[in-house]
Each structure stands twice: as C-alpha cells, then as structure tokens.
C-alpha cells in the first residue's frame, strides 16, 4: 500500500490535506488529530518565547474540517517573556473558523524538581499488539498515519484501552514530525480507542480537546491510556493519561456529543 508522505502539503499561504487526514465519520472530513497538530505548529511559530514549552492546549471544534485546503492565523493574546497565551484559528479558506487553539507557553529552566510516577502502560511497544482500526471506510485514512500498538484493549472492541504509537508520515511534507506534533496527531483518537458504543450504530464526535502537560514528550514511541464514560443524556467524556517511554507526560480530555446513527 502506497501512502502519502505527509498529512499536509504546503499550498501557497496554507496547506492541502492528504488522504491520511480522512476521519471515521465521513470520507470528505478530516479526523481532528491532524489539524490539531497543524494548529500547534502554527502557534509555536508565532510564539515570542524562543525554546519555550507548551503546557496547555485547549481546542474548540466549531465544525468538521473538510479534506482539502486549510489556512491558519495566529495572535498573541497575552504576551510575556516568561509566560504567554497564543491563539491560532484554522479555516478552509473562506475565513469561517473551524477549529481554534488556545495555547499557554512557558519559559523553560533546567534543574527543576521531578515527581516520580509509575508508568501507565503495562508493557512496552515492542511487546504490544499491532492493530489497524476496522471502522474506517477507506484503506488510506487517518488510522494509517501512525503505527498503533495496543498494550491493553483494542480499536475494534469496546472499553478502555492503552496504546503506543509512532509516526508513519510527516505532518507537513519536507519537515520531520516533532514529538509534540506527534502527540497531537495521536491524542484526539483517545475517544476512538476507548469507544463504548458500536461505530455502526452511534456517532460520538468530540466538540473539544484539552491537553495539559507537565513535561514535553520525548522523541520515539508515545502513548495514551484512555477511558470513555457515557452520561446517559447524549453526552460523554473521554480522558486519557499521556506518556512516553519514560513515563507520564500529562492528561487529555474530550467532551463527546453522542447521537444514534440514521438508518442507511
């Protein structure tokens, strides 16, 4: 199987999404993971803190992002030499916001205290099971952008899951994918690997994604231990512990809008 080299191709002042961004609900719409990473890339480029670390990323998903051209714009909401807030907005070229990122960034320093924590994964990536998601309707889509290894649970059965990933492509053609970009491509799939409902009978798309990090991810395999809880009223919440080979790096949360699928 021949895959595109990247999730996005540079296109003038913006980017064009490749088939690797296709999400599970509609072949014309992107999975939110790739545009989340693209928004992060833009926010870090706009940052005034050179070499700083991004510690919280709050995404609002106003509408699905089509598979096609996208444009981004950034502004510094709260400037500072030590702490800043960067806002980045993505649209499809018509100016209508589809996703928005609010990112807090901080100056780094060496020699700080570290709280020891147990590793969330019961086994490493080499001992975990390789698996591809069965619910995507096209062979080349988002699930092929990462190499998935499951330490617990599965893409294809309900319940909590713990999975490792590594990139199979670049974010933007011609650029290595950074560890934080990799983390964002992966993390929006937390609600997918821990789904509690049958994909053929219900939709459970997220309206937001919040990632809080106590340290930056290291290069190499990254993972998440994800759980989804249904609220019984059309809402659900997915939370995940995020980790690299050394241990936990932070947490994520997603608010899910749950609806029955219409009969075909």
Image (cartoon, rainbow, N blue to C red):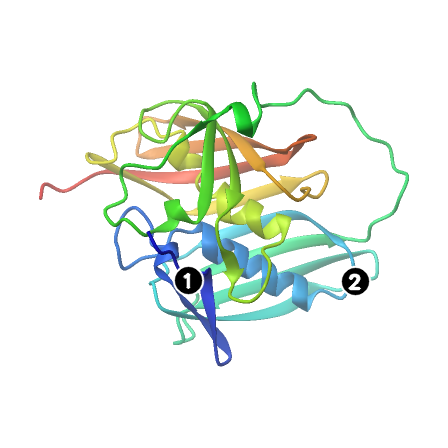
Q: Quadrant of residue 203?
A: top left
Residue 165, image x and y in percent? 51, 38
**In this picture, residue 222 sits left or right of residue 53:** left
- The residue furthest left is 264
Nearer to the camera, 256 or 173: 173
Q: Is residue 215 above or below residue 171?
A: above
Q: Earlier in the sequence, mark 2 or mark 1?
A: 2
Residue 96, image x and y in percent? 40, 70
Q: Quadrant of residue 52?
A: bottom right
**Residue where numbered disc 1 is placed:** 98
Residue 173: mark? none
**Residue where numbered disc 2 is placed:** 50
Q: Is residue 141 above or below residue 257?
A: below
Q: Is residue 98 above or below residue 93?
A: above
**In this picture, residue 167 sits left or right of residue 229:** right
Q: Nearer the observer, disc 2 or disc 1? A: 2
Please rate how many residues cluster around mark 2, counting C-alpha atoms within 10 Å: few if below 14, some from 14 to 19, many from 20. Answer: few
Residue 246, image x and y in percent? 70, 30
Nearer to the camera, 220 or 45: 220
**In this picture, residue 88 sits left or right of residue 257:** right
Q: Quadrant of residue 176?
A: bottom right
């Amino acid at each position: 199987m021949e895959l595109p080299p990247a999730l996005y191709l540079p296109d003038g002042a913006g980017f064009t999404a490749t088939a690797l961004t296709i999400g599970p609900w509609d072949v014309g719409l992107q999975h939110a993971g790739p545009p989340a990473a693209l928004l992060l890339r833009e926010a870090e480029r706009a940052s005034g803190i050179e070499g700083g670390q991004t510690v919280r990323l709050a995404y609002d998903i106003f509408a699905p992002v089509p598979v096609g051209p996208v444009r981004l714009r950034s502004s510094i909401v709260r400037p500072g030499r030590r702490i800043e807030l960067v806002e980045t907005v993505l649209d499809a070229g018509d100016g209508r916001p589809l996703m928005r990122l609010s990112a807090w960034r901080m100056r780094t320093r060496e020699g700080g205290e570290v709280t020891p924590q147990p590793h969330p994964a019961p086994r490493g990536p080499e001992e975990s099971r390789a698996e591809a998601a069965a619910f995507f309707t096209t062979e080349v889509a988002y699930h092929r952008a990462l190499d998935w290894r499951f330490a617990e649970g599965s893409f294809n059965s309900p319940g909590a899951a713990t999975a490792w990933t590594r990139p199979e492509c670049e974010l933007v053609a011609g650029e290595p994918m950074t560890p934080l970009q990799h983390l964002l491509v992966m993390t929006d799939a937390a609600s997918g690997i821990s789904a509690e409902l049958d994909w053929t009978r219900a939709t459970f798309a997220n309206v937001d994604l919040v990632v809080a990090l106590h340290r930056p991810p290291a290069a190499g395999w990254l993972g998440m231990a994800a759980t989804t809880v249904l609220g019984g009223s059309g809402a659900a919440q997915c939370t995940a512990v995020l980790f690299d080979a050394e241990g936990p790096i932070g947490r994520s949360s997603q608010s899910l809008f749950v609806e029955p699928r219409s009969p075909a």
